[in-house]
Each structure stands twice: as structure tokens, then as C-alpha cells.
Amino acid sequence: MASFSRELLLHLNRRSDESFGSQLKRQLREGIRAGSLRGGLRLPSTRALADQLGISRPVVVDVYEQLAAEGYLQTRQGARNTVAEVGSVGRGRDIAPPRREAAIRYDLRPAIPDLALFPRKSWLKSMRVALGQMPNESLGYEGRYGTEWLRRVLAEYLGRVRGVVAEPDQIIVTSGFAEARALVCAALRTRGVSRLAVEDPSYSNWQSVDQAGLTRIPVPVDSDGIDVDRLEASGAQAVFVTPAHQFPTGVVLGKERRRKLIAWLRQRSNRFAIEDDYDAEFRYDHAPLGALQGLVRDKVLYAGTVSKTLAPGLRLGWLVVPRDLIDCVQFEQGRWSEGCPRIDQNTLASFIESGGYDQQLRRMRRIYRQRREVLIEALARRLPEAEVTGIAAGLHATVRLPAGIDEDRLCAAMARHGVAADMMHKYRIASKGPPTLLLGYGRASESALRTGVRILAQAVADGSRAAA
């Protein structure tokens, strides 16, 4: 068997009166105590470490044996020496054990796709194609704003599927929506925008907006989407919207509201909209609506990702920017990023270009539609008093519950039985409303959906009796 050749940061002072064995033992012990040599780390073989340090192997053998006797190392016959786990030995500082979360058996959280259905084989095939076609220069620092291949493919794809009108040089590849939103907010602040209207309810994390120095103005959402009359009265200069499938309510921006929003944008030269088209590919009950950007391209910054369609872990998204704002957004991106990994970008380009992406979307629509039907049926049978909305698209449903139910207590009761769900009040800013849960069907099996709804119904019944 070849020696295990992993290196360690060790240095022996050959002019010191301290023996090599004593120096080595001291440095290993200090590294373990300080935590730089973490529990479970496999150490080099005695032969490899002796060769690295230029000392005799018996010295290393003796050091390993002494540290094992002191409890710093763990040894097993025929296996490499490993550093003892946290808590097995004294440390120079206290290390708090990680907090144990309640085990999730039925994951009904919203906006999470089924990661087990990621097309691994097709993705690997596309990666081989991408690597085979990439010249050496493309592995360097070029392509900060996105590779030419991916930007070209995205311009074509977004045009045919979402009605987005953009040239490749208007597209900036991002690591996801969070980066896109941060770029837009910083760029808008540079352009003199100080007041950003946001849908209420909406996303719960607005740190990038606040850090950019923008004032957030909540504008209520109803069954037709954002209230544009309230938007106009708010004094906002820009607005964040999810018109195709509002998050978290699931409503679609109505035609009249869409017309009024476009008119609002065109009234002033320095008015803009940030459009998050986060899951428009998953529409079930009627034909998808085109993106707002295609109707007023000089006023809308359009953002999308593969986080729902493929996997969040890919960390790939895009931002389509009006020409008047390209320089501002590119400048902001250049302040903190050299761009997304080029190989991953070109793999996505190959995946889309080959038809693999469209095929995966068709496959997932069939699966998610069936899971949605199972969820609706289970709710109708187990919890008929609940009102289910927001189900025309996406990966979750909004479930309005009887008055008097405490959302926090309900979710806690469900969690004790292994069911994870989400609460509407977490996303409210100034608005109020009846107790409502967000139930996702993206990553839950059909049996998990049925069991989760059964547990939900029991928790609602228990909560109603407690409140009586």
C-alpha cells in the first residue's frame, strides 16, 4: 500500500536543544487543542510524515503512540491514525456542541425542489461537452459578467420561454437571486433611487436593500397582486415585484394591475422595477404569462435562477439589465466578485442548448402537478375548512386556516411529529391577515404529503380545542 502523503504544517528546528520527537509531539498536541487539526482528520502515515520532515520513521511511530495513549489520537488496526473527536481531549478553548435540530421526516417547506431528481447523468454529459469546447483562455479571468456561450444561450431561451427581450451583453450571470438583488439595489442607489417599494407580504431577508441605503416601503398584495394605487401614493421610485407567481401568496398580477404598473413605470424617467421570475416555469392550470420585462424592457431589471428548476446548490442565476443601467450594475458587481465559475456556466449553456433543460422541466412539471393534486385532495379530505390558494403555479400552496389558530404553536406541534412547514406571518411586513401556512410539495413524496396533512389536521384540531 502506498504511503498516505497528505501534508501537515509542521516545522522542526534543527538547531534547538529540544529533540525532534518532543518538537513533533508538542506541535501536534497544540494543533489538536487549538482546533486547527480537527476531530476525525486522518494523519499521514508514519513513513510519509517522516519523509516530509526528514527524520527517522521510529521517531514518528513513537510520537503517534504517545499521543494515542494521551487520548489525542485514535488508532485502529489496519487504519490510519486520526485526530480524536471534539470532547475526547482537553482543548485550550470551549467548543459548544452543534445544536441539534428536530428531525424532519416530512418536508413541506415552500420553494424547495426535489433535489433527488437532479439530472446527474445529463449534467455530467453537458459538463464533458463544455470542457471539450472550452479553449484554454476561457479558464482564466475573462467572463466576469458571464461567459459568452451562456449569455447567448440565455438570451435565446428567455426570449422563447418567458418573452424577455435582451441581447447577450445585457445579461449578467449571478450566483443566485440574492446577488442579483444586491447588485440592483446598489446600482439603483447610485442612480439616485432612495425609496424602494416591496410587496407585502414578501421575502423575509432584506439585508441587501438596507445595506444599499434604500428605504423599504411595504405595499399590500391582494388577490390581483400588488396594489398599484397604493404604490403610486407611496412616493417610491422603484418597486420589487413577483408578477408571475407572487411570493408567498401565489397570486398572479392581474391584467389591469399589470397595465397600471407599466403606466407607473413610464411616468418618470428614473423609475424601475425589479422582477423576480423565480418559478414561472412551473405553471399547471393555464398558459404562462410572459415576463413583465418583455413589455417595458427599458424599465425592468429581470432576475431568474436555476434554484427551483434544477438545484440551489448550482448557485447560478441571471440578471437582465436595461442598457441605461448596465454600466452601474457591472461596476457594482466588479466591486466584490470575479463572476461565477466558468465551467459551471458553460455546462448550463450546453445543458440548455442540448434540450436537456426543457426535457427536465417537462419531467418535473408532471411530477409536481401530481404532487400538487395529492396535496389538494388530502387537504380537502382532512381539513375541509381550510381555504387553499396560490396553486396555479410554483411549488407550494397557501393554506388559510380557521381564525384563532396560532401559527407558531401549530408549526411547533407539527415539528414534534417531524413535519416542517412555513408560516405566512414570517413574510408579513405591515400587513395582517388570518392564520395561514405555506405548504410545499416540491420535495415531499405523495405518501409524505398525505401523512403531513394528516398531522396538520390533528394539530389544528388540538389547537382549536385548546383555544376553546
Image (spheres, grey):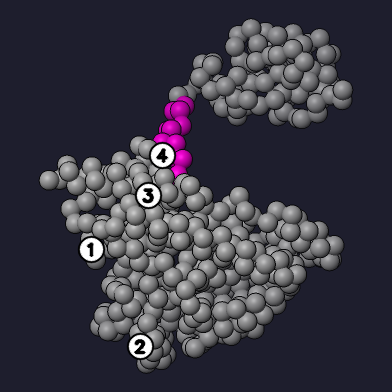
In the structure shown, which secondary structural element does the residue marked by tag 1 occupy?
loop
The numbered disc on residue 433 is 1
Q: Residue at x 70, y 53 (%)?
A: 120
Tell me the quarter of the picture where residue 194 sits: bottom left
Q: Residue at x 80, y 26 (%)?
A: 4
- Foreground: disc 4 or disc 1: 4
Q: Is residue 363 left or right of residue 285?
A: right
Percent from the top left, x then y, of residue 261?
37, 85
Q: CA distance from mark 1 to mark 2?
A: 24 Å
The amino acid type, in three-letter code, at marker 2 is Glu
The quadrant of the image that shows the C terminus is top left
The quadrant of the image that shows the N terminus is top right
Q: CA distance from mark 3 to mark 1?
A: 22 Å
Q: Which residue is mark 4?
A: 418
The amino acid type, in three-letter code, at marker 1 is Gly
Q: CA distance from mark 4 to mark 1?
A: 27 Å
293 within the magenta span: no
Circle 4 packing at 10 Å, graded few (<14), some (14-19), many (20+), is some
Q: Residue at x 72, y 70 (%)?
A: 355
Q: Which residue is mark 2?
A: 256
Does 32 sit above or below residue 263?
A: above
Circle count: 4
The amino acid type, in three-letter code, at marker 3 is Val
Question: For the view shown, which residue lies furthest in the left direction?
Answer: 468
103 within the magenta span: yes
Numbered range of the magenta stretch: 95-107
- Foreground: disc 2 or disc 4: 4
Q: Which residue is mark 3?
A: 453
Q: CA distance from mark 2 to mark 3?
A: 36 Å
The numbered mark, 4 or 3, whose residue comes first in the sequence reads 4
In the structure shown, which secondary structural element does the residue marked by tag 3 occupy?
helix
